[in-house]
Image (tube, rainbow, N blue to C red):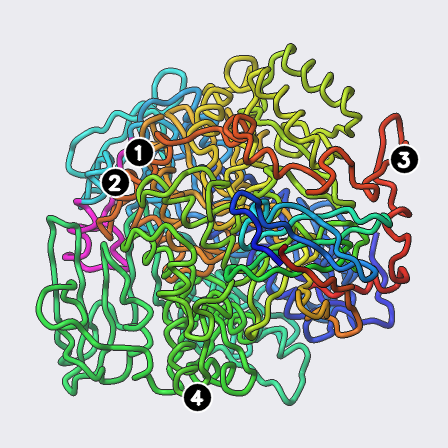
Amino acid sequence: MTATLGATPTIVLVGHGMVGQRFLEALAERGLTATHRVVVLCEEPRPAYDRVALTSYFSGKTPEDLSMTDMEFIKDHGIELYVGDPAVSVDREAKKVTARSGEVFEYDTLVLATGSYPFVPPVPNKDAEGCFVYRTIEDLLAIEEYAKTKATTGAVVGGGLLGLEAAGALKGLGVESHIVEFAPRLMPVQVDDGGGAALLRTIEEMGLSVHTGVGTQEIVVGEDGAVTGMKLSDGSELATDMVVFSAGVRPRDQLARDCGLDVGERGGITVDEQCRTVSDPHVFAIGECALAADGRVYGLVAPGYEQAETAAATIAADESEQLTFTGADLSTKLKLLGVDVASFGDAHGTAEDCLDVVYSDSRAGLYKKLVIGRDGTLLGGILVGDAEAYGTLKAFTGSVPPVSPESLVLPAGAGEPAQLGPTALPDDAIICSCNNVRKGTIRGAVTEHKCTTVPEVKKCTKAGTTCGSCVKVLGQLVNAELEASGVEVDKGLCGCFAQTREELYEIVLALRINSYQELLDRHGREEARGGDGCEVCKPAVGSIIASLAPTIGASGYVLDGEQAALQDTNDHFLANLQKNGSYSVVPRIPGGEIAPEKLIVIGEIARDFGLYTKITGGQRIDMFGARVEQLPLIWARLVDAGFESGHAYGKSLRTVKSCVGQTWCRYGVQDSVRMAIDLELRYRGLRSPHKLKSAVSGCQRECAEAQSKDFGVIATANGWNLYVGGNGGATPRHADLLAQDLSDAELIRLIDRFLMFYIRTADRLERTSTWLERIPGGLDHVRDVVVHDSLGICDELEKLMQAHVAHYRDEWAETINDPEKLARFVSFVNAPDTPDPVVAFVPERDQMKPDLPLLSIGMRPADVLEGSAQR
Amino acid sequence: MTLAPETTELKIELALDGDWFTVCDLSMLLPGRGVAALLPDGRQAAVFRDRSGELFAIDNRDPFTGAAVLSRGLTGTHQGRPFVASPLLKQRFDLASGQCLDDEAVQVTVYKVRTA
């Protein structure tokens, strides 16, 4: 069957990887999907996914998480995407492509984005059972299956970036891992011998065995044909149950060769600066299959994206936008098995007469080298173990830095610190190389587009939105620009305090201030001192005092003395205010586990007080419609039955959800319920800048949805993985992996530190997800602080948490035993027994709901109610 | 007029139709917080005491939602004037004038209040 060529011209894209997907987006941006029929032939069984993050599959990301294809996008733009149906031949004369299914597509423009294939050295038995490559999700699924069922040792051939990732993944699967690298060092392309040595030490300390300077001669197989070992070029033999080849990639140009397109000597479809093949003006090639005009094949995604944009712009033939691809920067910064590795510019010092400045500390796994030209120009460099300076150094590459080169690589504390801010950069310095954003553009975003924050600048310029390595420099630039343009950024908490929440926290902790009035009168803005504060700072300070209560000598009871006046109504009545002035009640049900007797008690109380009951998203039960004077009566019965406050009303820990885990579930690998209960009881009542949610899943299937929580825990065969900064709600965010394979004690210690660091540094009402995105250095910084103790504050963080745990008391038990506090729980101070007549209910679905018409009696017209402005 | 005996607690009183209506003992009011009082005609008043001891009373119904909750809001000082923020949708009301600070078209009733 032949698809008919209609009036609309057709673009056929062969290959749907990351670059292919970017090409489709580039077509759509230029309106070409509206004017063209667009056909995509994709070989893999799934549409484009994030191959760069492939290894994160082993730390819990699912293939769906890795997907980069929004099916709505495909549908909305009328793109015909054929998955699992690769192109098998091209007839350039007839301008037709035949797919494996037999379908034939006529094209006006053909774009090849076939990517690359893993190079497997031609050694005997290279295809034996137990031999794998590391390129697609399917490869990873096969490796995982084999490692779990048939292997105790594994060898990775190739010590480059992917090889190290593969070896780390094997180790994570419980397999003893070896790395075999032909070159004399690891990551030979990116680092030099010195960097390789620093890397080697760190990698070996992780328990990986590294064999450099040896080649693979033969794969040894047993009688069943499966791998048992490998023979190496130095005559030794390595016993192994599986082999993963990761010895580089080659351009996938067979389709092009078969149809007579010109390819390079060492592979790659030859294209010009517009990414058009030199052999045929109707055919383009982009990404790893293309041999660019500068004679190189680029194996990085950023150049591939640039080629995709170039091809799309050429096809659009818009005279105002003429893009060319003449080569790309190969600078890279990555975190490999927890080690920072970066190289930029002329990293290996190939320029004539260039000189090196090297700082090396093998003991600490540090290696930093800068390549300097004769006139002092920074040409490139390599950073291993600490790549903090990468963003700044890369931006200075090609210019003479204003400070001496050695001050740029010496560690802090050794010699003069380098005062090298990004403000010293010229306007045409590229800050974000993923999206090609120059410093001038970022300054313009602040001065012309009135952006005042990094997120605004990211949105405006796209800088920092791909790999994120420039976000730190971005923040410095934005602040410098704001200052320079005289914009005074008031970072104060509110009209009463010029300090941020973090600064107030430090003041309260350092000076042991446990009174809001004292804080306001001594540290508030001049005009606010002696006043009554406001609704913004009162609860924020109340929360700080409560978080630090045992340490600063304040009462941990939020209704004590002056503290009572600081609390929002929810905290003041220890219940959640609902729209008609009634409250809802949520007793704590740790981990979502509840015995039948307690369920019955909740049922009886709800029935006796006529409450509406609903199961919450956090695995507990919410009882709605309690009048304020009923709260103590309800809680007297709940406390009597062994319940305690669930803190559903507080900016504090809510729940720790769990799945049933190993105890019942055939897939479970740890006891997730016990861990959830332990965590919930440990952190209950902890006041924080915003609410905290958590969950524990008993296996990678993740039924407890831990990755949508502020801190989530997922069981592994070896312990627990800790994820942080997740969120559901209006702006969902997948949590980031903070640490892997932790024991119970390690897990709890890390969460203690993480939560206390968050409480210390977050803004008011800032969830962990936004906090992680905002703070300089992001996740890496948080990991440095709480895992590696880079600030030396972990002891203090742990002590603060221990004090909280030791001093926890149930607020409701305390309140029902205090007649003075109980007197506050009335609708009317002059008629304690009279209920509020506005709080009434009408039946609905076997229960009741607020009588809303009652609320509008004697009130303003409904339009005012709906239009009421929220600040 | 004689001085009241020292054992008698000060009472909070609201002006209603030219008369003074007793609400509660002054000691029932925590500085910075409010209480609600049921008035003889069925209306409700929210009574507040600020840090300096000054008293204020406004209608307890929140005009934006209809719920009788203003007495449960947080108080503060805005440009030298006392206010309460509704605990439901956080609009602020000037305690002395009843004017909503976030919507000039909205105002709540103000009651005269004294201690006696």
Query: Label 4: chain?
Result: A
Task: Assess whether residue A188 is covered by the magenta stretch.
Answer: yes
| Tag 4 and tag 3 share a subunit | yes
Query: Reading the chain from its start, which is encountered first: label 2 or label 1?
Result: 1
Query: Reading the chain from its start, which is encountered first: label 2 or label 4?
Result: 2
Q: Nearer the viewer, residue B23 or A282?
A: B23
Q: Place residue A207 in its image quadrant.
A: top left
In the figure, A775 relative to A242: above or below?
below
Q: Is residue B76 left or right of residue A372?
A: right
Among all residues in the image, which is located at the extreme front? B2
For the point 57% across and 51% down, which residue is it?
B4
For the point 31% across and 33% down, which residue is it?
A155
Query: Reading the chain from its start, which is encountered first: label 3 or label 1?
Result: 1
Region of the chain picked out in magenta, as a range: A177-201
- Mark 4 vs mark 3, CA separation in Å: 59 Å
Q: In this rendering, which labeled residue sits more in front, label 2 or label 4?
A: 4
Location of mark 4 (residue): A485
Q: In this rendering, which labeled residue sits more in front, label 3 or label 2?
A: 3
Q: Position of residue A89 (x, y in %)?
A: 65, 55
Label 3: few (<14), some (14–19) or many (≥20) C-alpha neighbours in 10 Å: few
Location of mark 2 (residue): A180
Q: In this rendering, which labeled residue sits more in front, label 1 or label 4?
A: 4
Q: Are marks 3 and 2 in contact (CB under 8 Å)?
A: no
Label 2: few (<14), some (14–19) or many (≥20) C-alpha neighbours in 10 Å: many
Label 4: few (<14), some (14–19) or many (≥20) C-alpha neighbours in 10 Å: few
- Mark 2 vs mark 4, CA separation in Å: 55 Å
Query: Reading the chain from its start, which is encountered first: label 4 or label 3?
Result: 4
In the figure, A462 relative to B21: above or below?
below
- Mark 3 vs mark 1, CA separation in Å: 70 Å
Label annotation for residue A155:
1
Amino acid under label 1?
Answer: Ala
Q: Position of residue A321 (x, y in %)?
A: 61, 85
